[in-house]
Image (cartoon, rainbow, N blue to C red):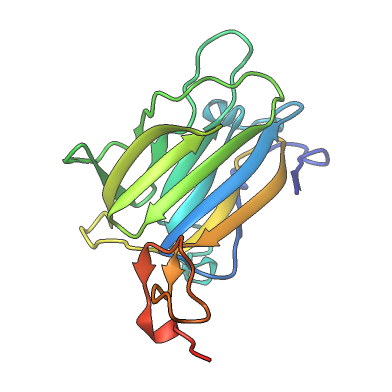
Amino acid sequence: MKVRYDEYDQFDGQFAHIFYEEPFSYYRLKVEYRFVGEQAPEGPGWAFMNNGIMFHSQSAESMDLDQDFPDSIEFQLLGGDGDEDRPNGNICTPGTHVVVDGELITDHCIDAGGPTHHGDQWVTAELVAHGSEKLQHILNGEVVIEYARPQLDNGQRISGGYFALQGESHPTDIRSVRVLNLEGCMDDSASNFKSYYVKNDPYSCEYS
């Protein structure tokens, strides 16, 4: 997939999200991406080499027409300018909050302290989601932050939802998107048992 703005005269807050059709709660999501080219004209300064993976999200259908971002958690994808450090893999929280090290954080973005990835190098971003119990951001195999208890601004706990890839005004290539459901039948006598499941769904078990 390619995010491009070649025919834009200017970027006028036209943020984009492409949603996967199914919601998940317990899963692993792996995205290989890179930033390329120049930012769209009039793109906001903070959106330079900036996109994200929105997850535990509301559905696309439930968004308001003038809503820029879904209520969700964002695995922020940032690129470096070739000079200054710019930590990657941060958490951003449109319409939400999370708990880090036992503390409820209400800041919009939380620094994960991940490495800086300059230029147009390919980066592998991996999300591990265990409902609302454990969430991890992983970059090129390294865990950069772990947190829990995502919730809407009103305090309602979020244990799952949709995921979407974001377009915030900088051209981006995405060469791979892979999702592995971690919820299913954990009875090893069932024909559809998988050893990697971490959440049991006994009603899904099939026996021959």
Question: How many numbered discs, if any?
Answer: 0
Measured from the top left, where is residue 159 in percent x and y?
Answer: 33, 63
Give the residue furthest to the bottom.
208
Residue at horizontal 53 percent and vertical 71 percent from the top: 61
Q: In this view, does 179 lie above or below 85?
A: below
Is residue 8 something one can see in this rendering? yes
Which residue is most to the top? Answer: 83
Residue closer to the observer: 74 or 112: 112
Q: Is residue 24 left or right of residue 146?
A: right
Q: Position of residue 66 (x, y in %)?
A: 51, 58
Question: Viewed as shown, does residue 207 lie left or right of 43?
Answer: left
Taking the spot 25% from the left edge, 61% from the top edge, the residue there is 157
Q: Residue at x 27, y 48 (%)?
A: 148
44 relative to 63, above or below:
above
Which percent across, then down, holds residue 104? 19, 42
User: 199 or 21, which lies in front?
Assistant: 199
Please determine whether, in this image, residue 60 is positioned above or below residue 177.
below
Front residue of 89 and 130? 130
| Residue that lies at the very extreme toward the right in this rendered image | 7
Q: Quadrant of residue 151?
A: bottom left
Q: Is any part of residue 69 visible from this angle? A: no
- Lateral position of residue 129 relative to residue 78, left or right: left
- Residue sitting at x 35%, y 52%: 95
